[in-house]
Structure formats: C-alpha cells, structure tokens
C-alpha cells in the first residue's frame, strides 16, 4: 500500500464519529440487574436481560440524569420530550431480538465539542441498551473445530451514543475530539472512558473527496477501534484504501468494516444497513419521557467544573497552557492539584514538581498520585519549606522522592537529615576562604579573566555543604573573597 502522503494533496478526509459511552450506573438501563465490569459470565443477568416473555422494562432515572448532564456539558438542547424505539435485529447476544434505543426523538440534540483549532458539531446523543458479548472460544469443542459462548453481563448496560457531525478532516482531529470528549465524560462522572475495557467505544465514519469538491463521498463505518492509536491507524489505512479505489476509477461502497489491529487493515464486515432495515418503531412498553425545565436546571446546578474551565483557572494561577493541559488531562492529578492549590502553595512550583520528579516516580512505580505516599498536606509542607528558603530547590526535589518512598513528614526529614539551608555568614565564610586558599591556580586563572571558573568555586562550596549553602549569600561571599 502507498503512503498517506501520496494522496494528501489530492483528497481530503471527512470523518464523523459515533461514540458509545457506557454510563456509570449501579444497575442496567431497564432493570435492576447490576452492570459491574469483570464479573463472572452471566452473573449480572435476570429476567429483563434474558428478555423473558411478559417482563416489562422500567427506565433507570439515573441514566436520564446522566444523559441530561452530558447534553449540558456538550452545549446540546435537551428537548422537553424524548422517546424510546425498538431497533430490530437478530443477534445471539440480544435475547429479545430487538434493542431499545432512541431514534427520531433522542435525549440530546445539537451541541459541540471544542478542540484546539475548531468546534466539532454534535448531531445528537441518545440513550440505549448495550448487547451482550460473544466469546469466540476457538479451540476444539462440542461441535467440531470451534465454538462461541454468550456472556450476557453487558446486555442491558446503559449507553449514551454521541453522534458527531462529519466535521473532522484528519485522524489527528478525530483523536483530539475523542480525547476531549472522553475527558468531559470523565469530569462529569458519567463514564470512566476506558477504551480497552470497552466502556467507551468509537465507530469511525470516513469518506474522502477530491480537494475543493463540496459534496461528501460515500462513507465506510469502521468498527472495533479500541485505542487512540488504532483509531488513527484505521483512519489512515482507510483513507489510502478509498483513495486507491477512486484512482482506479472505482466506487467506494457504503459498508461496515472491521479494523484488525494486528494486521493493520480494515475488512468488510457487512453492507451498511439503512434505518428502514431495522424496522424502528416506538417502544410500546415505555411511555415517552417528559423532561421539565426544573429537572434540567436541577441537573445543571450539579455540573462540576469542566476541563476547559479548569484549564483557564490553572493558567490564571500561573501555569503555561502546556503545563495546565498535562494536569487537566489526568483527572486524578487534577483533583490532587486542586487540593494542593487550596493550601496556598505557589501553583507554578507545585506543577513543576508534579510534572517532573513526582510524575517520573509514579510512572516508574506504576502507581497513581492518590495511591502514593505523598499526601497533599505533606507536599504542601515541603513546598512551604522551599518557599521560606529553609531548603534549597535541589534538596526539595530529592526530598519529594524520599516522601514518595517513605511517606515521612517533610519537616521531620529536613531536621533528621540536617538539610536546612545554611544562611549565616559565619558558617559559610570559612568554607569559602578554604576553597580560595586551596585552589590558587584556579583563583589566578579567574582573576586573569576566566569568569566561567566562578561556577567551579560555587560547585566546591556546594559539595562541601551538601548543597545546603544559601546561594545568594554564597555568591556574595565568593565574589568578596575572590576580589581580595
Ligand atoms: P448510522 O447509524 O447509519 O451509522 P448515524 O447517523 O448514527 O448513522 O451516524 C452517521 C455518522 O456518520 C455521523 O457521525 C456522521 O457525522 C457521519 N457521516 C455521515 N456522512 C458522512 C460522510 N459522507 N463521510 C464521513 N462521515 C459521515
Ligand atoms: Mg449509528
């Protein structure tokens, strides 16, 4: 296959994404069965999930609350009425033979997500139930060479499908959109955004068109992308595949394609159904849902700070845009940082430590900040000692590692190890004098114009004091002695 770049001057990608976010509820969308991830197969099931005859769905209010909250965070309109519809299809992992979804009256309409260079439009978001999972066992079994098992734990799990406008023009934009959306969903607490576990899944629609052409080309929908990296790779692959078809005078057909992460290719899974193939009709077992203004306002009043707002606040506190984004993009780190800011530490210094020594340690030990031994109080104490000038920056850097390892109190560590800065002249002067006396050659060279040697003297003095000499005072005394 060719390089993406071969066709980039000629064709443009048009990308629209359907993101399925699994809502973080305790129970399923239409019944009381639990929906925790990782349980033994078929233990999170019951009459509703199994679709036994005569049972009736009851809508889980929490799903509606989360749908509204998401809509508000995405600048959508929440219509005063929405309804549920049956989408018919036969799958072994969907015992009822239909999925309860929303079709023409979804819970959220319109909206947008801001990425760095533009707004990506949101078409709509609707509530629906997930299907179960087929486990393809592969090995020889009862019926010959291979067989499949059905696990219905996931069936009936609440999903919010968020459909974007075809507003993205590159895999990078698609990636940024999903990352931003994921962050928002995590911040508002409706979805844990775990692509690998499948609690967030993206289907990527992509078509291409000759640059300058207004009309969109025919799209393919790519399923099974379960990481940011595979999203980018799948889109790049698909761009080239479609470009080659057009170059050869062929036509792209509308279909669903499956991404194979190992092979790095997409392959046709099925022709794309049109809506009429699903025989949508209003779900007779559920009343249309009316959502009052009061309900919406109640949910709005619970809206937590969103990533964009946090970014702005951090930048006002003195962080660069980059630093702010690194912290905002890690929700646990951001929570921790917020607690830290409440203790009146210097924001910039705190973020330097967090993104430097602390992040490196956490990565190495594969732990998260909230599970580390560095409590907010102790970290604030350490930064306080640095601010007061009791300890130097380098010592603070090594102490933060000590605390991460042992959880010891910052103040006690400083006392125990005798690490406080030496700021009295009577202690530093003799050291400086000794260094000047012991290094006559360097002193002569320095006096002869080799200014750079000043650093050598500073180094010697720091070595002697184990980094504890007050730098300003040391500089002053050194200059004074060298000029004698
Ligand atoms: P379906 O259920 O048939 O997949 P949806 O309306 O749920 O239809 O989703 C269609 C998705 O495809 C949307 O994200 C939309 O932005 C995107 N899309 C529509 N037309 C095109 C196109 N020509 N090229 C790329 N993406 C498209
Ligand atoms: Mg769809």
Image (tube, grey):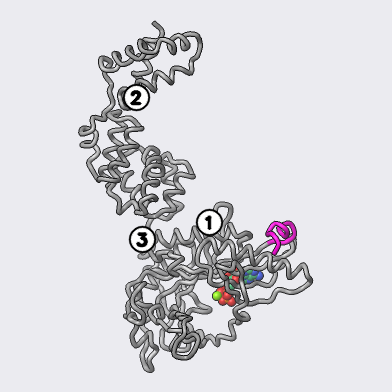
Where residue 288 sits, quadrant-wise, is bottom left
Alpha-carbon neighbours of circle 2 within 10 Å: few (<14), some, or many (≥20)? few
Per the rendering, the mark at residue 396 is none
**Viewer-proximal residue among 124 and 451:** 451
**Viewer-proximal residue among 57 and 332:** 332
Which type of secondary structure does the marked residue at label 2 adopt? helix
Q: Could you tell me how far apart the alpha carbons at marks 1 and 3 are, in whole angstroms?
A: 22 Å
* Residue 97 locus on image (x, y percent): 47, 89
Q: Quadrant of ligand 1?
A: bottom right
Alpha-carbon neighbours of circle 1 within 10 Å: few (<14), some, or many (≥20)? some
State left or right for residue 367 relative to residue 143: left
Residue at position x 39%, y 5% from top? 484
For residue 407, say whether it is visible: yes
Per the rendering, the mark at residue 114 is 1
Which type of secondary structure does the marked residue at label 1 adopt? strand
Residue at position x 46%, y 52% from top? 308
Sequence-earlier tag: 1 or 3: 1
Residue at position x 34%, y 78% from top? 40
Whether 447 is drawn above or below 212: the answer is above
Sequence-earlier tag: 2 or 1: 1
* Residue 126 locus on image (x, y percent): 48, 74
Per the rendering, the mark at residue 463 is 2
**Viewer-proximal residue among 98 and 429:** 429
Which type of secondary structure does the marked residue at label 3 adopt? loop
Q: Is residue 62 magenta?
A: no
* Part of the protein shown in magenta: 1-12
* Residue 389 locus on image (x, y percent): 30, 28
Q: Are marks 2 and 3 in contact (CB under 8 Å)?
A: no
Q: Label 3, on which residue?
A: 301
């Amino acid at each position: 296959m060719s390089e993406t770049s071969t066709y980039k001057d000629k064709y443009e990608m048009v990308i629209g994404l359907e993101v399925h976010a699994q809502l973080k509820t305790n129970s399923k969308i239409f019944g009381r069965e639990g929906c925790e991830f990782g349980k033994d197969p078929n233990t999170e099931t019951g009459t509703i999930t199994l679709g036994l005859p005569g049972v009736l769905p009851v809508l889980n209010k929490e799903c509606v609350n989360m749908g509204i909250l998401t809509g508000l965070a995405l600048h959508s309109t929440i219509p005063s009425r929405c309804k549920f519809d049956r989408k018919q299809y036969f799958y072994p992992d969907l015992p009822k033979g239909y999925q309860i979804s929303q079709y023409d009256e979804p819970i959220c309409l319109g909206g947008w997500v801001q990425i760095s260079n533009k707004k990506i439009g949101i078409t709509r978001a609707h509530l629906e139930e997930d299907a179960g999972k087929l486990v393809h066992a592969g090995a020889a079994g009862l019926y010959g060479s291979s067989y499949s098992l059905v696990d219905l734990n996931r069936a009936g799990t609440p999903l919010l499908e968020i459909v974007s406008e075809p507003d993205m023009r590159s895999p990078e934009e698609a990636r940024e959109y999903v990352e931003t959306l994921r962050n928002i969903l995590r911040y508002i607490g409706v979805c844990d955004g775990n692509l690998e576990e499948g609690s967030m899944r993206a289907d990527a629609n992509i078509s291409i068109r000759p640059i300058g052409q207004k009309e969109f080309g025919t799209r393919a929908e790519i399923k099974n992308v379960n990481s940011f990296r595979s999203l980018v790779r799948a889109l790049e692959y698909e761009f080239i595949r479609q470009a080659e078809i057009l170059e050869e005078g062929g036509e792209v057909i509308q279909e669903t394609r499956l991404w194979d992460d190992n092979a790095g290719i997409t392959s046709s899974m099925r022709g794309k159904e049109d809506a009429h193939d699903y025989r949508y009709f209003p779900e007779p077992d559920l009343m249309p849902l009316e959502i009052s203004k009061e309900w919406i306002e109640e949910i709005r009043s619970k809206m937590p700070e969103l990533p964009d707002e946090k970014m702005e606040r951090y930048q006002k506190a003195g962080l660069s845009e980059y630093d702010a984004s690194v912290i905002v993009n890690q929700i646990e780190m951001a929570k921790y940082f917020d607690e830290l800011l409440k203790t009146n530490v210097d924001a910039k210094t705190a973020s330097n430590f967090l993104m430097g020594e602390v992040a490196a340690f956490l990565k190495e030990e594969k732990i998260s900040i909230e599970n580390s031994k560095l409590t907010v109080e102790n970290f604030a104490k350490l930064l306080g000692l640095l601010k007061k000038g009791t300890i130097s920056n380098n010592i603070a850097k090594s102490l933060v590692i000590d605390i991460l390892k042992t959880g010891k109190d910052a103040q006690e560590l400083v006392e125990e190890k005798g690490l406080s800065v030496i700021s009295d002249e009577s202690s530093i002067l003799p050291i400086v004098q000794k260094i000047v006396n012991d290094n006559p050659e360097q002193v002569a060279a320095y006096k002869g114009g080799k200014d750079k040697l000043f650093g050598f003297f500073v180094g010697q003095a720091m070595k002697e004091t184990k980094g504890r000499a007050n730098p300003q005072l040391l500089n002053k005394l050194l200059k004074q002695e060298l000029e004698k």
